Amino acid sequence: MLADFPTVETLPAVAPIGTARTMHSPHATLTALIDRLQGPAGTGEALKAISESCEAARVAGLARDPGAMEALESETASLDPILRESALAYVSGDLRRYLHILDMLDNVLDLASLEGVNQIYWSMQRQLFLMRMDMATAPDFVTDRLFPFYERFLRQTAVRLGLTPKDRPAGMPDTGRVVIVTNQFLSAEHQPSRDLLTLAVRLQRDHGRTVLVLNTNMMPDRYYSPFVPPFAAAVEDRLSGEQTIRAGGERIRMLSSTAPGITTDKLNGFLSAVETFDPDLVIAFGGSVIVADLLESARPVLCVPTTSGHALSLADIVLDYGGQAPPAGNGRLARSWRPSRFRFSLRHTGDTATRVEFSLLEADFVCVVVGNRLDTECDEALLGLLERILDAVPQALVLFAGGVESLPGRLAAARHAGRLRSLGHVDRMEALMSVCDLFVNPRRTGGGAGAAQAMAGGVPVLSFQGGDVASVAGPSFLVADDTAFVARAVELAEDPALLAEARQKARTRIATMEREGTDNGQLSAYMAEAVTLFEKRR
């Protein structure tokens, strides 16, 4: 099947969970949550309803009330422990709850459903990605607890399914082939999918390699456990079997499986495909790429993270996302880390627009928030900050670009409803950026590609520290707290010269990043080093 990937609507990675703006008393919020938790929890809809109640309790600050938390613990003592601990973690952000869950799973790891464990693992990862957890409650959670658990889960998967990747014989000549393995490939409108194709094209065109992409869909696509909030990844059903994708003047071969769950046939199919293709190197595109990590005993593996933070990978080399510090200590993650800069597939079509096309006035100071998870990321804290900016800057308004469900209703209930506008999915992102003045970033991990596209168009970024956007934007565009966040927006709105300077800094920053991201010499050296490290440990 030859796929040209026409423009299609981006599929959300998880069904969004809205944040209710209706205010309730702490007692009513607590009572509603307890009622939800003690009710049905056996369907996806029930878990989403429980999650909404947890989110309302989190936003209401229930965790700051010791009495309320004590009552919540007492009233939920007899519940399913995974449901209970994940709900308490959701409300409080306390990672020690996740430690309890990992301890429980470790005790039954040889008996528990692999799909259920996988669901819980990715649901935890999702909450970490959304910055919903307080890392201070367990500072070394990712490196010291979650990563070792992931390794044990992989071993258990291999043992229970009888997976034995065949070693490549020592001393064999290079084949010039590379396999790229991903957990999820969707469409040309899915940024990580575009970035993967950019890497594949680069390997074939600039490095002379023949590339095979494995689209494994190993993240859960349905609910196998009572963990809240539940996570289920999108799957593109039309990408099943063998595909040939045209991109950047290259033809990229891809093998996909849309079969649900973790099964022997599915995993052995991918392992056999690798053995037949016989690559010199396996590239894990992203962290926790199960099939790539199952191959680490048989092939050299290099990991290319697609987001900031610590990418959990068994690869010989794990590249930095950009501007991050290496993991602390001398463990496996620290030893495999190498400095690098992730390369985004930015659009450079020159598409522009007039403000009239987006119903804007020339005098407007246009802020924009961009993302695929705006229902979740645009929480009450962000909306409160935006309303403070609108209070201080009469000519300011905020646009929200990205697929949404619950956000428009919450914007309609805001004090500045007419100046908070949801555009929904936007095809012409370059054109939108050409009429914007400031890219406003919520507290989140993602958003790096949107920020890079904005800066390429000369739109400065306003962000807190931490996450993909902070890595992309750099120190000049970061602020320390809420007060500085509002103050910076006001300064840019009131000082045209300062705004013009910030625009130029944005363009310069991205031009530098794009040069770093296309360093073929560095990529070749890391690929060769991964092979050398594998030969030393085999």
Image (cartoon, rainbow, N blue to C red):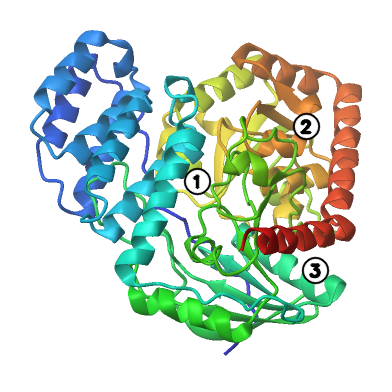
Label 1 residue SS: loop
Label 2 residue SS: loop
Which label belongs to residue 202?
Answer: 3
Quarter of the C terminus within the rendering? bottom right
Residue 213 spot, x, y in % from top left:
61, 74
Q: Residue at x 63, y 78 (%)?
A: 169
Of the residues shown, which amino acid type is indicated by label 3? Answer: Arg
Circles 1, 2 touching at the beta carbon (< 8 Å): no
Circles 3, 2 touching at the beta carbon (< 8 Å): no
Q: Residue at x 31, y 39 (%)?
A: 102
* Mark 3 surroundings within 10 Å by alpha-carbon count, few (fewer than 14), some (14 through 19), many (20 or more): some
* Label whose residue precedes the other's in the sequence (3 or 2): 3
* Mark 1 surroundings within 10 Å by alpha-carbon count, few (fewer than 14), some (14 through 19), many (20 or more): many
| Residue 438 located left or right of residue 48 | right
Mark 1 to mark 3 CA distance (whole Å): 29 Å
- Which is nearer the eye, 389 or 141? 141
Observer-side mark, 1 or 3, equals 3
Residue 499: tell me if it is visible: yes
Q: Is residue 180 above or below residue 438?
A: below
Residue, disc 2: 474
Task: Tell how many labels.
Answer: 3
Of the residues shown, which amino acid type is indicated by label 2? Answer: Gly
| Residue 173 located left or right of residue 148 | right
Which label belongs to residue 373?
Answer: 1
Q: Residue at x 28, y 32 (%)?
A: 100
Q: Is residue 366 above or below residue 351?
A: above
Q: Quadrant of residue 79?
A: top left
